[in-house]
Amino acid sequence: MAYNRITTMNILEVLKRHNQGQSISSIASSMGYDRKTVRKYLKAIKNNPAEDPEGIIKSLIMSEVMGRPREKQDILTPFKEEIQSLINDTSNKLKPKSAFEVISLKYDLTGRVSYSSFKRFVHKNQLIKSSLRTSTCRITTEPGSQCQIDYCKAGLIHDHATGKKKVVYAFIATLSFSRHKYVEFVYTQNEKSFIQSHIHMFRFFGGVPVTIKLDNLKSGVIKPDLYDPNLNRAYAEMAEHYGLFLDPCRVASPQDKGIVERDVQTIREEFRKMLALNPLLTLSEANEGILSWIENLYGRRKHGTTQEEPYTLFLKEEKPRLLSLPMDEYEISEWKMATVHPDHYIQVNKKAYSLPEVYIGKEVMVKIRQNTVSIYYNDELIKQHIVPYGFRQTDINDFPEHMRHRLDTGMPFYLREEAQKIAPEFEKLIVKILSPNAYINLRRAQSIVNIAKGYPGEIIKLASMTALEEYSNVHPKLFRAIIEKHQELESDKESHEMSLSLETESFVRTSDYFTH
């Protein structure tokens, strides 16, 4: 039993109850003392019947206080300020239990100081204030039937790339039956990261739960609704691939996933402990450390609700009941909405893709994967493109015939005329750039014409010939580089063909002179 402070009035109350006939066990139970303590004070008063009971009690208390060993308290005294900082630091606040573990590991106090002595030290020095406790919802489920998902802000971590502090979030997944969990620390909560964490979770568990209970995070639920929530399309595809069901919670109802809500405090505390022991902790080190802690420490302790070891219970009863992993791992896709512009193109992730004229002005759904882009209209696939290396991916068949060859009117005709004035070869280059659709590369052709106006016609002629022969795709930067290369060649040629003065020519000899 932990130390419980006793006063003179308390002992007089004990004496009063004993004189009224109450048993020692009854007195100890009602007043919260140990029976040996009650018996000790009653014996001291009984052995000195002639003396004042109150005086006997005061002398006993004083001798106990003076004689109580202070070794444990003295061991902790040098770390008082650090303990206070660990418990009260708002940026990385630890619970007393975690602070005790950090101090014990950091200064090798394991076995020298107990947690009870640590608590007495904290309370005596008023290093912590009591806080209100919150309750969580306990749910009983079948093995493998449910996994609860949540995100939380874990804290700040030193980013070695930038040298600054960076916010770290924790993806937490807890199996409702065994309480075994998967945790992953990430820098972002976007759609791709959210789905990627699920894939890592299934791989870690070695199977798939039947249902996932999740919060209304935008990465998973676009529009919350009690009966018909609008799920993120990529997230719904992931669930279909693994054969599981998604069950979003009610808005602002954390009790719907009370199991994982309680784990938020535990994981955040463990992250802060790792950070307290290693201030230069990296994200990969944090992820390795938390998974090791889950399997080797947390998973081997009895859970307060199930009274079972989470990892042991998972291996024994829950893992065999999980759904099997599919043969192929889910390839993460990204869904976006786009409008087809009058030039037949949509723009997605800073790249342009062509569509037939019939879809101009309409909104389409675009599914982006690593190498391909699929475009849907009214849930029907209408076009597929390969992700281009450059900006634009064009299918000529998406454009009507009258737009493919429109070089004789408007701005295309004007650019051809300007190119003809400079050199015929340059006109051929501009025609090649503008064909087969005069409006696709109109700005590129206009920029190249403007560049050509700043150089001699002979240089532009040579540069145009080189561009036509050696390059299939000419852009302004490349054309300028070709021009500058020809300028250097012409400059070198002129330097070798410099005329000689009469005085210099007098020293020149023919080849016949040297043959003799």
Image (cartoon, rainbow, N blue to C red):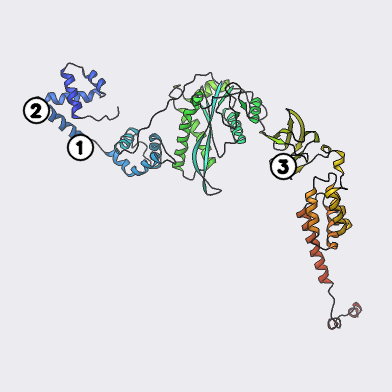
Q: Residues within 10 Å of mark 3 (few under 14, many from 20)?
A: some
Give the camera-side residue of 229 and 156. 229
Which residue corresponds to mark 3? 351
The residue located at (39%, 34%) in the rendering is 97
The amino acid at mark 2 is Glu
The amino acid at mark 1 is Met
Q: Is residue 356 left or right of residue 43?
A: right
The residue located at (55%, 49%) in the rendering is 162
Which residue corresponds to mark 2? 51
- Judge whether 367 appears above or below 391 on screen: above
Q: Which is more N-terminal, label 2 or label 3?
A: 2
Front: mark 3 or 1:
3
The amino acid at mark 3 is Lys
- Judge whether 158 appears above or below 43 on screen: below
Q: Which is more N-terminal, label 1 or label 3?
A: 1
The CA span between labels 3 and 1 is 80 Å
Q: Residue furthest top?
A: 21
Residue 102 seen in the current view: yes
Which residue corresponds to mark 1? 66
Q: Residues within 10 Å of mark 1 (few under 14, many from 20)?
A: few
Q: Position of residue 134 (x, y in %)?
A: 42, 27
Give the camera-side residue of 175 and 339. 339
Q: Which is more N-terminal, label 2 or label 1?
A: 2
The CA span between labels 3 and 2 is 98 Å
Q: Are marks 1 and 2 in contact (CB under 8 Å)?
A: no
Which element carries disc 2, helix, strand or loop? loop
The quadrant of the picture occupied by the C terminus is: bottom right
The CA span between labels 1 and 2 is 22 Å
